[in-house]
Amino acid sequence: MREKLEQIRKEALQNLADVNADLEEIRVRYLGKKGELTSVLRSMGQLSPEERPKIGQLANEVRESIEQEISRRAAQAKDLLLQAKLKSEKIDVTMPGEEPSVGHLHPLNRVQREMEEIFIGMGFSIAEGPDVELDYYNFQALNIPEGHPARDTQDTFYISDKVLLRSQTSPVQVRVMEKQKPPIRIISPGRVYRSDALDATHSPLFHQMEGLVVDKGITMGDLKGMLETFAKKMFGDSTRIRFRPHHFPFTEPSAEVDVSCFVCGGCGCRVCKGEGWIEILGAGMVHPFVLSNCGIDPEVYSGFAFGMGIERVAMTRYGIDDIRLFTDNDARFLNQF
Amino acid sequence: MNLSRNWLLQYVDVSDIDDKTFCDGMTDSGSKVEGYEKLGEDIENVVVGRVLEMVRHPDSDHMWICQVKVGPDRVEQIVTGAQNVHVGDLVPAALSPSKLPGGVTIKAGKLRGVESNGMLCSMAELGLDAHDCPGKFEDGILILDGSDEDIGRSVNEVLDLNDTVVEFEITSNRPDCLSVIGLAREAAVTFNRSLKIQAPEVRHPDRKDSIDHYLKVSIDCPDLCLRYMGKVVKNVKIQPSPQWLRRYLRASGVRPINNIVDITNYVMLEYGQPMHAFDYRMIEGKQIIVRRAQEGEPFKTLDEKDHILDSSMMVIADGKKACALAGVMGGANSEIQPDTSVVVFESACFLGTSVRRTAQKNGLRTESSSRYEKGLDPENCQNALLRACELIEMLECGTVVDGEADVYPGKTPLYQMPFEPERYNQFLGTDIPESAMIDTLTRLGCVVSNGKITVPSYRADLRCMNDIAEEVVRIYGYNSIPSATFRAEATQGGRTPRQQYVFNMENTLLGIGLSSIQTFTFVSPKNYDKIRLPEDSALRRSVVISNPLGEDTSVMRTTAVPSMLEVLSRNNNFSNEQVSLFEVASIYLPKESVDELPDEKTRLVVGMYGNKKNFYTLKGVVEAVLRASGIKGASFKSCSDDQIYHPGRCARVVAEDGSVLGIFGQIHPLTAQNFDLTVTSYVADLDLDALFAHADLHCHYTPLPKYPAVSRDFSFICDEELEVGELEAVVSRAGGKLTETVSLFDIYRGPQVGEGKKSVSLHVVLRAKDHTLTVEEAEKAASKIRKDVEFKLGLNIRS
């Protein structure tokens, strides 16, 4: 009987060794109800009581080894099948992806948003004012009366004697100060208009971002500190700023502010025209005339204001050499942002 | 303002400071330098030579072979083609190798076989013209004045060609710096040097004569003329100015003319005070009257242009006629002539706004008017006038008549204000010592004493604390101010709800594939024709710019659709296959009066064309906008009355309360044609203000359904005209409370349903909130749907 069992094991394993073996058929043949091993076990009764457990154990061993081999072969076959399937499913990964279409934020919006986020983080709100503005807000309230030579430097579009297209975002300062008492901390981005013919570097319509802080005890040192923070966040941590005295009718003292070139770091390059500095901002301490004109006592409060051109920042930052690209809205341009 | 550094040296010694350091220093203290140019640098190795011998060139009928002495022991052979040279002449000789203006280099060579070791130069070859070299022959070699001692000296030296011209951008509050003396004062303070200014003096006036014999001055309009001074010079000899004076004028960008004209220009540049010179012969009635012009008074300026004046303008007149447009330009009738023998110098102070208006109205902006506009110092008139007479004596070209005319209605005391050193420091955030402040202010011309500052007359810009603080700090150095962080009451920054709404909306549109654009807000009025607005449309009335750059940018837009169509057309021309764009666009709706500000409204304009895009692509975007705004219950009403859009492919978006939120559709082929738009395009014009007003930006949670839904599909055959929206509405209402969703899943047109018909298939989901629907309930709802559709719309059920 022992030999019989060994014979079954040997034969079954031999059959299973065949790569084309039908595993189910082999299982039925040896382990099924009418299978060879089963029939051997059925004749166990003929054995002596001493022999029976030994043969039983052997029979179980044989069953196990056949079962194991069948499941091993089954797993192997399944694996082969899977491999074959995977192989047949191979694709060309270099073919283009199906990218979901996402829109592009216009570079001017993009720069403006970036600036807004920086100032919002410093506690500023965004104030808005009309494009079509009263002469009073654009000039008179800003210490630029009728006949003032500063009116010549900003060639202004007029609608009537009293109404014009704002030539700066500064009128928003006045509108805010008329309505709101200090502390004031606002920025006002927006369109401004000047009578300059359109060419690569001039546009009759461009964007500015104005800022205003008014409170008790605001100093020129505060202005410097805040612009330094802005410049570092906007142009990188190593950015330095430089103040040059200037004149604006609505601030006193006034300054033009340069930032160290963010391309070359100040050594001089094409972007900064070898200067190492790029002129970005105008700034100054709010003129007492402007404050008192808005009902804010300059003996009690002081403040600073600053302004910058959004196109200018966008052009230097992205290396755009023609301002007309902004309003051409060519998709090939827009898609780069 | 162009400043000659040579000229500057007359008043402040900064000769040891190189150009770059000088410019940076001046910029940092507030006189902004735009750039500088080194004159004479383009001429190298050109020296004075004496022609010793001239012989004809053997192979030329016009060339000469010259032996030129160019140094104590050096003679060079130079061939010239000029015919005005004679033996013994002093000439500019460009030796080999040498450089001339315009990048020309001269090297030894052969001219028709004869050696020539250089070139004799004409004035043009040295970059000069007849104004630089008065009385010299223009079309030949420049024959120099001088002696044997000059032989071998460089022409740069002999002709005073070397200088550095610094170009300043002087701000409008500092007219005093539009002068050599003003800038000298700034340079002296900046570089801590002493300033040397001598009061001008007339040393040899003809004391037997008096101005009273010549002239009486009166001012009829003291509101426009603060001061008028005059002096008379007789025995005048009109001749060229000396070289030093000509070179200073040239470096300053002024062309030398003759001594009298040059003196007026020289004094203007030196003192910043415009001067005028009249030919006394032409002054009638021995009087000068400063008066307003008469309405319609004709006047010819010395540039030979005719003007018609009005009473807002000021003229300088004699007893009979106007002789000058005050502060702007002299008249042709009293101009200095070659034979002028008696001259009246005018040194006056006119009101800036008056001069500005006069200059503007006559289209004449002169060096003089642009200075007056900024408001000049009447105290400066006297020094300038005396300086002009001093120069007459220096140049020995006339006799100054004793006495001067001076009418001074605008005299004001010097301005005083408190000296508040602590306040300046507090305001600036600095710690500048009081003594340093006093030093700075004193050097700038202020007098500080007894806690008061007395401001010099030429600094009308110093009137309040801030002004003084600026003076102190610009000399101390802006960049020496320590940066600080301000401590202030906390402010609540951030975006307003509306700004946040727009910000989020932009993000939504970007997320679904639309790019943002920026367009001009001023447009051509022709745009209204191009979008075929009806003649009586209110949108044709725009805010009109009175001084536009051109018609194309002459009105503020009342609709932003044309701007979008232009952008679509441009992209199509650029062969961009497909675009999807949006603009948050301002429009401007005028009020009754032009003096009132218009209503500025915000539109959300969407535009697209390209592959696979159709009406429903655009509608999907509009639906996304509504969804992002939380607007529910809006409906789409087909619209065929807007000429921008295809009459069968256009819809209005109507909110539940009936207000219109916008319009969108396919662009009408005729509109498209007007924009040269050759591709089928789709545009939505949404009212962003109305969208925001209707927006519900709060999120609400609806509990997830607990009971299963039942779905039923229906197909209805109907006329082509029946809108799916209407069918959906009937189906939705018929299902009552049980209706969860009704969605279109197919439309079939074909022979089975017949001509002019379509089969519409809807997928309906039914659900009860509180229990599982029974088959009976579902069947009841379905049959109600079928019945309602049949009765209300008269349709057949297809399946």
Image (tube, helix red, strand yellow):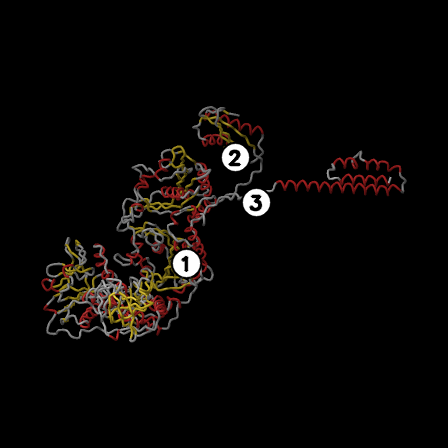
Find out whether the residues at labels 1 and 3 contact each other: C-beta distance under 8 Å.
no
**Which residue is rendered at x = 25% and y = 71% of the image?**
B50
| Left or right placement of residue B32 versus residue B383 in this view | right
- Mark 1 or mark 3: name the one nearer the start of the chain: 3
Q: What amino acid is labelled 2 in the image?
A: Glu
Q: What amino acid is labelled 3 in the image?
A: Val
Q: Which residue is mark 2?
A: B740
| Left or right placement of residue A40 versus residue A288 in this view | right
Q: Nearer the viewer, mark 3 or mark 2?
A: 3
- Closer to the camera in the image, A176 or A249: A249
Label 1 and label 2: CA atoms lie apart by 61 Å
Q: What amino acid is labelled 1 in the image?
A: Val
Q: Which residue is mark 3?
A: A93
Circle 1 marks a residue in which chain?
A
Q: Position of residue B290 (x, y in %)?
A: 15, 61
Q: Position of residue A80 (x, y in %)?
A: 68, 41
Local secondary structure at mark 3: loop
Q: Residues within 10 Å of mark 3 (few under 14, many from 20)?
A: few
- Closer to the camera in the image, B448 or A265: A265
The total of numbered circles placed on residues is 3
Q: Which residue is mark 1?
A: A271
Local secondary structure at mark 1: loop
Vertical placement of residue B488 versus B582, above or below:
below
